[in-house]
Image (cartoon, rainbow, N blue to C red):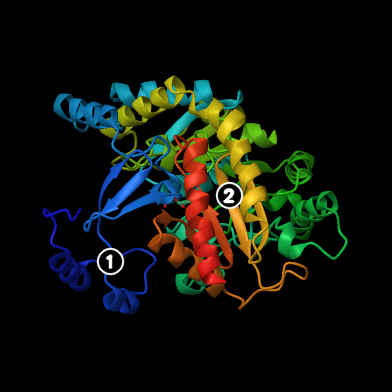
Amino acid sequence: MTNHKYKLQELQQLDAAHYLHPFTDHKELRNAGSRMIVRGEGPFIYDSEGTEILDAMAGLWCVNIGYGRDELADVAAEQMREMPYYNSFFKCATPSPVQLSAKIAEIAPPNIEQVFFGSSGSESNDTALRLVRHYWALEGKPEKNIIISRQNAYHGSTVAGASLGGMSHMHKQLGGAVPNIVHVMAPYAYELAEPGESDEAFGLRAARTIEDAILAAGADKVAAFIGEPIMGAGGVKIPPASYWPEVQRICKKYDILLMLDEVITGYGRTGEWFAATTFGIEADTITTAKALTSGYQPLSALLVGERIAKTLVEKGGEFYHGYTYSGHPVCCAVGLKNIEIIEEEGLVDRVRNDTGPYLAEQLAKRIAVHPLVGETRSVGLMGGIEIVKDKADRSRFQPGGSAATKVRDHAIANGLMIRATDDTLIMSPPLIWTRETIDLAFDRLLVALDLAE
Ligand code: PLP
């Protein structure tokens, strides 16, 4: 049913005239016009014309507890009335960031001690970059400042985030990245493994490109390695089981800090609170955002391990870094409530024991057998589907992704919000999805695949 509160054409005209969208070709947008998403309920979103769409992306990998949760709206309103804003500078704090930092430390891997808040994942990676360099300076080794990252990684859109990231089109537009960041191979076996190379051997080879980069620069010049446990925006690239243990071994051997970017994987997506646990990684920093508030408020948290925390406190001296909205009381109150809901509803366990395995099974049974699909993969509720021209030789229709975009467009028209990146379809639904929701999503996706064939 059309929502009469919003006049689509009027909004589209204003949109085209004034609103610069993120990551958008505005010439294209002007011709097409934006779809106005006006409401959400549970796993569904609705546009101004009343179309119901099942959201397989949880917004942008974030609405983990689903849409329309009054509990979060109530807690935000309550906090706004009591104390809408006060800062955590000048030896002050408000209660909710204190409580949230303690709660995060409770659910995080055991070595995590402290938490630094920002408003976005990009900001949080800026903080992480500066923090690890500050750490080595405090340790008397300021020359240890190179960060090793991966090609095609996504770490955000600020100058530091895009520099850490490995997306070449973003680097081109930076006109000068943050110096001393080196990119190595992504652990993407489907495309980068040699013919006949086992997953295990490929995982070790990909990890050892980090060692090569350390040796090329000199270990005394390298501060840290940063990686997403599963590369998200780069196409839900799940590393082979051999990858992370080898990365950990290399970091330990050369005394390099290990930074994880869990902006997507944090807060339950992989069936553990953090993917660090899923993959058995002990990290010195963990960047988180998105699902910390299920996207209801902008909030990020950089989790800091005991090694850095100890040096910060023992050596002292000011870390000249912070944001007006670091530890925003409303955002933190919403974050606390969100984590409480995830706990009360047992969503992490549900992903680990029920919906995660079911998604993997149904991807294999229903989607992987389609002639357009070369591979399906998932961990918890995070999945990738490779669109290919030829399953046997893995060749693509057209490098750069037009085939997956076609499937995506049919899927959206058929009531399923899914994303395409190059020739990979990616999904990351709310953790409230059930087996029935997964069945409904795949009914709609199969129609889209058939239409695109
Ligand atoms: N890191 C990862 C792994 C992400 O996926 C993203 C966003 O998608 C970011 C960082 C940046 O987060 P934000 O868009 O909140 O700045």
Residue 171 seen? no
Residue 1 seen? yes
Residue identified by numbered label 1: 34
> Is residue 258 shown above or below 238?
above
* The disc label shown at residue 159, or none: none
User: What residue lies at 48% left-to-right and 59% top-to-bottom?
Assistant: 419
Q: Is residue 51 left or right of residue 157?
A: left
User: What residue lies at 16% left-to-right and 24% top-to-bottom?
Assistant: 82
Q: Amino acid at mark 2?
A: Gly
> Is residue 280 shown above or below 382?
above
Q: Which is nearer the eye, 143 or 336?
A: 336
Along the polypeptide, which appears first: circle 2 or circle 1?
Answer: 1
Q: Amino acid at mark 1?
A: Ser
Residue identified by numbered label 2: 383
Q: How many marks?
A: 2
Q: Quadrant of the C terminus?
A: bottom right
